[in-house]
Amino acid sequence: MKKTYIHILNIIGLIVFLVFNAFAYLGMNFTPSNEPLTAEYVFLASFYIILGGFYYLQLKHSTIKKFIVIIIIESLFLYTWGLFGKGLLETLIE
């Protein structure tokens, strides 16, 4: 598979995460909170770390079969991290 498609797909993913994190960050700043938001900020930053790790795997294994498997694993990982990651980070960090 051409690396151009991998770059385009990951740039689209980066834009989606930038929009998601911008709304989440703005939402956290408009709600009053008496506790630190350290876990929430780490949670938002972790999406970029996960995206970067899978981006590296996609570039390293660029055959179409491996690419599809990596995309499916990435989607499942991001979905489960989105559901349970914040709660896990709150118990570890705060």
Image: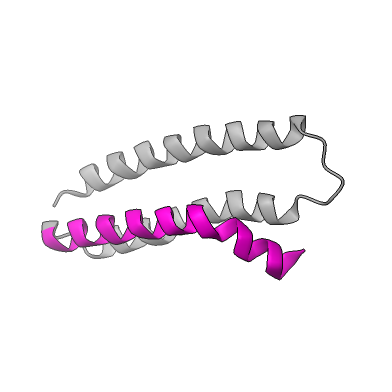
Q: Which quarter of the figure has residue 4?
A: top left
Q: How many marks?
A: 0
Residue 65 pos. (x, y %) = 12, 61
Residue 61 pos. (x, y %) = 22, 64
> Magenta stretch: residue 90 in it?
yes
Main secondary-structure element of the magenta-colored stretch: helix
User: In the rendered view, how is the structure colored?
Assistant: one colour
Residue 76 pos. (x, y %) = 34, 58
| Residue under the image location 16 percent in, 48 percent down | 2
| Residue under the image location 48 percent in, 40 percent down | 17
Q: Is residue 10 above or below residue 38?
A: above
Left or right of residue 41, residue 80 in this image: left
- Residue 85 appears in view: yes
Q: Is residue 60 above or below residue 24?
A: below
Left or right of residue 23, residue 63 in this image: left
Residue 93 pos. (x, y %) = 73, 66
Q: Nearer the viewer, residue 19 or 9?
A: 19
View extreme (right): residue: 34
Quadrant of the rendering where the C terminus is positioned:
bottom right
Q: Nearer the viewer, residue 76 or 48?
A: 76
Q: Is residue 37 above or below residue 32?
A: below
| Residue under the image location 59 percent in, 31 percent down | 23
| Residue under the image location 29 percent in, 42 percent down | 9
Q: Which residues are magenta?
A: 65-94
- Residue 49 appears in view: no
Q: Which quarter of the figure has residue 63?
A: bottom left
Q: Which quarter of the figure has residue 28?
A: top right
View extreme (bottom): residue: 92
Q: Nearer the viewer, residue 10 or 24?
A: 24
